[in-house]
Amino acid sequence: MQQTTVKGRSRAARGLFMAGASVLVLGLASGQAFAAEAPLAATADAAGAATPTEEKADFGTRVEELVVTGASGAVTNAPVKASLEATQPQSIIDRQAIDQFIPATADYTQIVNLSPSVSGTSVNGPGLGESKTTLRGFQDGQYNVTYDGIPWGDANGPTHHSTSFFPSSTIGAVVVDRGPGGASQLGAASFGGSINLFSPEVADVFGGSQSVTAGSWNTWMSVTKINTGEIAALNGARALFNFQELKTDGALTNSGATAYNQLVRAVVPLVDSWKLTLFGTWNYTKVYTNDSSGATLAQVALYGKNFGLSTDPTTPTYYKYNVVNKHTYFNYAKLTGDITPSLKLENTLYSYYYKNDTESALDPTLSVADIAAKKGLQITYTPGGQPTVNGHVPGYTKLNVYKIYGDIVHLDQELSFGTIKAGLWWEQADTGPRARYDYDATLGHTDAGWTVDYRQKVLPGVPQYLEYLQYSGWNQYQPFVDFQWRVTPALTVTPGVKYVTDKLSVDSDVNQKTRAPFHGSKTFTKTLYFLTANYKLQDNLAVYAQYATGFLLPDISAMQVVNPNLDDLHPQESTNYQVGAVYHGGKFTFDADVYQIDFTNKIQTVTVGSETVNFNLGGATYKGVEGAVTYALTDQVFVFANGSVNSAKALGANTTIAGVPVTIVGGKQIANAPKSTAALGVLYHDDAWSVSLADKYTGEQWGAEGEPAAYRIAGYHSADLSVVYRFDRYRLEAAVYNIFDDQPVTAIKPGKTVPYDQYYFQPERNFQVSVKASF
């Protein structure tokens, strides 16, 4: 009863605080009358004049091309907005919104949280450790992430490392497409949607900025930007340089991180309409974290919700046993121009590289007593084998290296009645070595440490300490064509088709999981179809509809079994149906949609004897309602809200695999899929001040399939307050995140038994203060 009273008071206090803070923000506009609804043309100039001049040197106006409308005050200041040309649900998040609402240290996963149907938490603090995003219930790896139109992700599966390539300072805008898009929307996971990141624009004039951020957990960050402006001696070429350095102790104990990023983007005019864009970014991160992070309830009871790692060398959570070093780069060269007055070419050659060098304790959930008793280690004692010394901590080193390179060609042919958009995407992935070696973490990198033979099953000719040593890759190409048919000046209908060919291969003497040799490949093909329509009821009101098919190929885990049944395994497939509307008014902007996605051919696994078998069975039905709205109370005060109701229910199915019955229970919300999201906030903005108060709610979800009560995760909030003051060429910001210091459970990872389940919590209340000088 006492606990209930405290929770009730907490909710009441939260409500009073939000209401009071909102009144304070609204009070900044006291004495001003509410403006009447004005046409877009009348408000566009005023909105543009309010944009601080010092920001233009950092980020140009490229996002205006995404919005495709005259910018009213409501549209300009909306945290998320949609285009009047949209053919599927989308959220456009420009740099102004990123600067106002998102921590300076963030990565893209915090930025996209502004969007409806999107959720995720960085448990070590914003941008201070890797985090994952859920989109409509689709998990990372079930949707695409692109940067300047280039899909990127891991080579052993299309998942993403949020801190490894693109910190917030390298992002000029983000577009969240909640659907497969058209045929020209590229990526290995044309399934659940696409998160599209755009680099900062290169300014035409010389300028730049220096910013310094300090915050909770001894966090500091420095960002230097320099725009050269047009260089007459180089035919008007111009370039942007960006340098970021970050260091933190992290929200979790003993989970410090260091990160460096360098970026250059150059635009080189060639002749007539032709230009060449050169881009490169290099990134290094070092973070103390276990390869399987998270805290058991026993650890939480002893050390608190902020527990990450310890300073005790007798435990597997000792921070020096758990460290991840990553080196990456991402480069491209893009050539654009007009072949004829009606035929345009865009050709992008790209490559990116990833190296992950990890040292990790075998199991961070084990206690000192577990280690001494060898509990849970599944040790195989073999003749001549040497287990870890009793009481020593077993560990492993992991290496993952890959390089991906490709070419994307777009050809746009203008016709009197429409536009043909055709092209080809080709990509090659070379992965290896991917390796994992067991060793005695207590002894470290010594001869004695490397001779440990404590865990792996016996296979002739394979060193006992070697878990896997693998090379793999893919070669894929996707020709595509969309036809934007302008049926009338108001109606555009776009059919499209794409043909996918992807050859997946593994070349391994010691394959992952099986530790047996495997040398093989499998080619998957699929034809995808698209049909969209956009109809403008008025110049500032459009409705749209979409039908699209999607797919998701098996990843290399399909080949990490003793007897891969590749001939019987098929891509996972989806069929999307969506309708929506977008309105841009002088004081009011909104977008809303309803959707249904039928997901079939889900890849499942079952253990038959001691072997894992992959097979297709069942799927899920995703459906829901989404919306976003911003209203201008005055020329300086804006209220906004967005939200979603998201159903992601598993489909029931039954089969028998090698004599083993398999039953998939239907009608339950799939794991890690929130049933709803919501955001509510208020923004005051004038020439000098910007003050925002926003709250994000993530709805109820479950950490395991079948909605088990023990894995239910209640809905939770995070409220943030940001105050920005601009004068001359300076910008000062103070922000508080998670104002109410709530630390609810945000995720649960089931362990081998319940006591070893790992829990993840929202970081405690934290702050950041930033100072920026522009020139």
Image (cartoon, grey):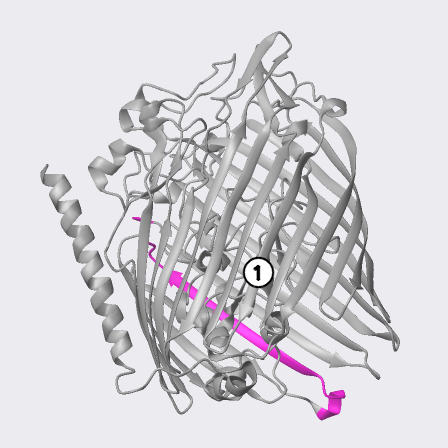
Q: Residue at x 62, y 35 (%)?
A: 599
Q: Residue at x 31, y 25 (%)?
A: 755
Q: Position of residue 187 (x, y in %)?
A: 68, 50
Q: Position of residue 127 (x, y in %)?
A: 43, 58
Residue 699 seen in the figure: yes
Quick one: label 1, few (<14), some, or many (20+) residues within 10 Å?
A: many
Q: Position of residue 638 (x, y in %)?
A: 38, 74
From the viewer's perspective, tell me whether residue 444 is left or right of residue 616.
left
Query: As displayed, is residue 40 above or below residue 392?
Result: below
Q: Residue furthest front?
A: 537
The amino acid sitting under disc 1 is Ala
Read off the residue under disc 1: 581
Q: In the image, which residues are magenta?
A: 232-254
Question: Which is nearer the eye, 196 or 106?
Answer: 196
Q: Is residue 251 shown in magenta?
A: yes
Q: Position of residue 700 (x, y in %)?
A: 37, 40
Q: Residue furthest right?
A: 340
From the viewer's perspective, tell me whether residue 419 is left or right of residue 457.
right
Count of all numbered marks drawn on residues in the image: 1
Question: Which is nearer the eye, 702 or 76?
Answer: 76
Q: Is residue 359 shown in magenta?
A: no
Question: Which is nearer the eye, 728 or 682?
Answer: 682
Query: As displayed, is residue 126 above or below residue 299?
Result: below
Q: Quadrant of residue 31?
A: bottom left
Residue 175 seen in the figure: no
Q: Residue at x 47, y 55 (%)?
A: 116
**Secondary element at tag 1:** strand
